[in-house]
Image (cartoon, rainbow, N blue to C red):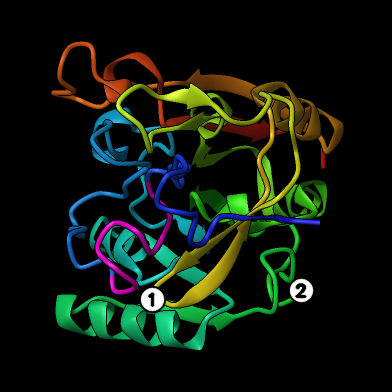
């Protein structure tokens, strides 16, 4: 059963939600996100600096959980042929408008889940990207298996998730305190923009193991501290985001 995190009593600490999902940066439209580079998390280096996906001009890129389409538009501006996938029709409409405003082409696909990729041929994709959307997936290995199927051998799959260490903490009081165990995988239900969203916390080791078990080799693991975080602040001492890059092994 999911832990509900909607409206705690005023005298109880309020657990801090994941620092960024595809909706929290600026409401559902994500208005504060630009389209110059794909974003992995708040205040941390973006894809323009990290270059985890490599050159994208002429490449086929899959954006899983595209939300309002900011990363998809950024990739298309670099010359990529982008397939943007999301379960939310309203988000896909925002992505369509963003692509239209930028004058780029993005193929939009609505899927009931991020593992529903039957419309993509095997070994057809050059790079796969996802920013925080995989936190909402209950069966992560199933998604990884589908990504492995559509990705070309040795090509990159880069994604970010809420850092499990940050999810342990509540910041509803002057001093953050531990409110759940690091390995606690009980889902957390947040009320965001009037809707319930269920996140599935996982340890770094659990994600790493799921990637290995589905045919990937992990070659990059980042736990960046936000740029400009005030000394002594929670942002400066506990990362909010973990970023993985894995490469498909075998066929």
Q: Nearer the viewer, residue 11 or 99?
A: 11
Q: In terms of image quadrants, where is residue 249?
A: top right
Q: Earlier in the sequence, mark 2 or mark 1?
A: 1
- Quickly name the residue at label 2: 118
Residue at image point 38% right, 76% down = 106
Q: Residues within 10 Å of mark 1 (few under 14, many from 20)?
A: many
Front-lying residue, 190 or 78 = 190
Q: Nearer the viewer, residue 37 or 87?
A: 87
Residue 69: quarter of image: bottom left
Residue 167 on image: x %, y %: 54, 34
Tell whether 85 sits left or right of 102.
right
Residue 105 pos. (x, y %):
32, 78
Instruction: Write the start and end of the magenta stretch as one range.
Output: 20-29
| Element at label 1 | strand
| Secondary element at tag 2 | loop
Q: What residue did someone put label 1 on?
A: 106
Judge by depth and name the residue closer to the eye, 151 or 171. 171
**Rendering coords of residue 168 (x, y %):** 56, 29
């Amino acid at each position: 059963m999911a832990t509900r995190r909607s409206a705690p009593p005023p005298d109880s600490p309020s657990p801090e939600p994941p620092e960024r999902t595809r909706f929290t940066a600026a409401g559902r439209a994500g208005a504060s996100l630009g389209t110059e580079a794909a974003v992995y998390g708040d205040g941390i280096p973006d894809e323009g600096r990290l270059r985890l996906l490599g050159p994208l001009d002429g490449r086929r890129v899959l954006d899983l959980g595209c939300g309002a389409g900011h990363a998809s538009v950024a990739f298309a501006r670099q010359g990529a042929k982008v397939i943007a996938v999301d379960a939310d029709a309203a988000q896909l409409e925002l992505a369509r408008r963003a692509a239209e405003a930028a004058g780029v082409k993005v193929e939009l696909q609505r899927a009931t889940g991020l593992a529903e990729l039957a419309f993509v041929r095997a070994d057809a994709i050059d790079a796969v990207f996802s920013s925080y959307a995989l936190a909402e997936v209950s069966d992560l290995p199933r998604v990884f298996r589908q990504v492995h199927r559509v990705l070309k051998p040795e090509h990159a799959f880069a994604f970010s998730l809420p850092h499990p260490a940050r999810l342990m903490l509540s910041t509803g009081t002057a001093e953050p305190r531990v409110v759940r165990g690091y390995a606690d995988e009980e889902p957390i239900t947040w009320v965001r923009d009037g809707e319930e969203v269920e996140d599935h916390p996982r340890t770094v080791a659990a994600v790493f193991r799921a990637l290995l078990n589905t045919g990937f080799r992990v070659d990059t693991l980042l736990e960046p501290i936000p740029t400009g975080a005030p000394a002594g602040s929670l942002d400066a001492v506990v990362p909010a985001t973990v970023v993985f890059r894995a490469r498909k092994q075998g066929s």
